[in-house]
Amino acid sequence: MARVRVERTEDGFVARNDRGAEVAMGSGDEQGTFTPVELLLAALGGCNIVTVEPLTAQRGHRMVRLAMTVQAEKIEASRLGPITISYDVELPEGDEKAAEVLRAVAHRVEERYCTVSRALREKTEVGLELP
């Protein structure tokens, strides 16, 4: 089970996992914080990249640089438009198949193996428990 606790603090809001990691959140006006939408985009990018990297490396094609930008525009006050994942990659010199392997793995990961992508695409149900 994945679990995160989100709470208001003296300085804004923070999300913490059971391993002690935390991320500061805010409305977008505060320095050093992520907005909830930015965290959603980070989760999507993180899910993809932490799955793509070992799979390409296992196939013998470790990228020199592997990064991505994930972006979306709000099309309504509380609704995002399409999300775009743009890879920024430096291929290993002399590796003729690296780009082909990266494309195949990245598509497969986004379509089948990234839990965050699937949750967004398949409209995962959200329950609300109140006191």
Image: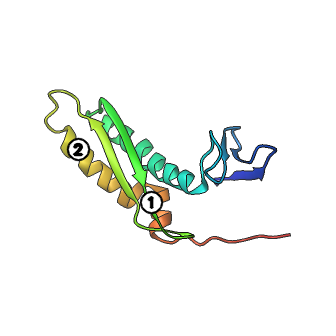
Q: Nearer the viewer, residue 64 or 30?
A: 30
Q: Quadrant of the N terminus?
A: bottom right
| Earlier-in-chain disc, 2 versus 1 | 2
Residue under label 2, please give it.
Answer: 101
Judged by depth in the image, the label closer to the viewer, 2 or 1, is: 1
Q: Quadrant of the C terminus?
A: bottom right
- The residue at 44%/55% (across/down) is 114
> In the displayed image of the protein, which residue is found farthest to the right?
131
- The residue at 63%/40% (across/down) is 31
Question: In the image, residue 81 lies at what x, y percent?
Answer: 43, 67
Question: In the image, residue 7 lies at what x, y percent?
Answer: 77, 52
Question: In the image, residue 18 lies at what x, y percent?
Answer: 71, 43
Q: The residue under label 2 is which amino acid type?
A: Val
Q: Residues within 10 Å of mark 2 (few under 14, many from 20)?
A: some
Q: CA distance from mark 2 to mark 1?
A: 20 Å
> In the displayed image of the protein, which residue is found farthest to the top?
93
- Secondary structure state at the residue bearing disc 2: helix
Q: The residue under label 1 is which amino acid type?
A: Ser
- Horizontally, residue 129 falls left or right of residue 105, namely right
Residue under label 1, please give it.
Answer: 117
To which quarter of the image does residue 23 belong?
top right
Q: Nearer the viewer, residue 34 or 114?
A: 34
Question: In the image, residue 101 lies at what x, y percent?
Answer: 23, 44
- Secondary structure state at the residue bearing disc 1: helix
> In the displayed image of the protein, which residue is found farthest to the front?
29
- The residue at 47%/46% (across/down) is 46
78 vs 93: above or below: below
